[in-house]
Amino acid sequence: MLWCGDMLDNQEARIASCVHPSHLSSPVGISVPLEEILRVQQLIAEERKFLFAQVHTHPGNAFHSSTDETFPFSHKPGFFSIVVPNYGRRELESLCGCEVFELKSGGTWRKLNQAEIGERFVILQEI
């Protein structure tokens, strides 16, 4: 799943929608066909939104695999990869139960600690 939304200012963004791209899956991973990547990018551009994060799950503990690091949906610095543990079978009230990685310049990933996750990702109740 992809999180899209709006920049509110230089420090704050709001997730406004989610996109679930069509993909091919196997017991060891998924792949998104190039045509689907282009379709999603066009959809986001037409809606004048920004792509902020990819959210996916792994069995057992959450971790960032070499595939996650090599083939993110976006290669822009500041893009997040959020990994939910246990195939998302447990209810989460925050992202603190997940592993969150931020793409840095040069294509490297930095894992956020639990305090950073709590500070940077605030879940608001719908009004």
Image: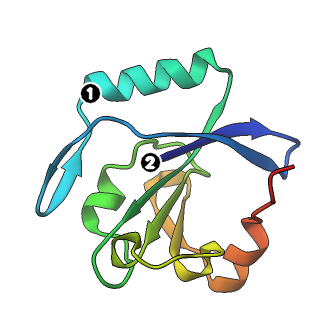
Which is more toward the observer, 121 or 70? 121
Q: Residue furthest top?
A: 46
Residue highlighted by disc 2: 1
- In the rendered structure, which amino acid carries the disc numbered 1? Leu
Residue highlighted by disc 1: 34
Give how far across and how far down residue 122 sits, in percent.
77, 65
Give how far across and how far down residue 39 sits, in percent.
39, 20
Marks 1 and 2, how far apart in space?
16 Å
Q: Is 14 positioned to the left or the right of 63 in the image?
A: right
Which is more toward the observer, 74 or 53? 53
Residue under the image location 56 percent in, 25 percent down: 44
| Comes first in the chain, label 1 or label 2 | 2
Give how far across and how far down residue 104 sits, in percent.
56, 57
Which is more toward the observer, 22 or 29? 22
Give how far across and how far down residue 3 sits, in percent.
57, 45
Give the class, few, some or many, for how many residues have Cα within 10 Å of label 2's Cα (few <14, many ≥20). Answer: some
- In the rendered structure, which amino acid carries the disc numbered 2? Met
Residue under the image location 30 percent in, 84 percent down: 60
Q: Which mark is residue 9?
A: none
Q: Secondary structure at mark 2?
A: loop
Q: Is 107 positioned to the left or the right of 18 in the image?
A: left
Q: Is residue 2 above or below residue 83?
A: above
Q: Residue furthest front?
A: 127
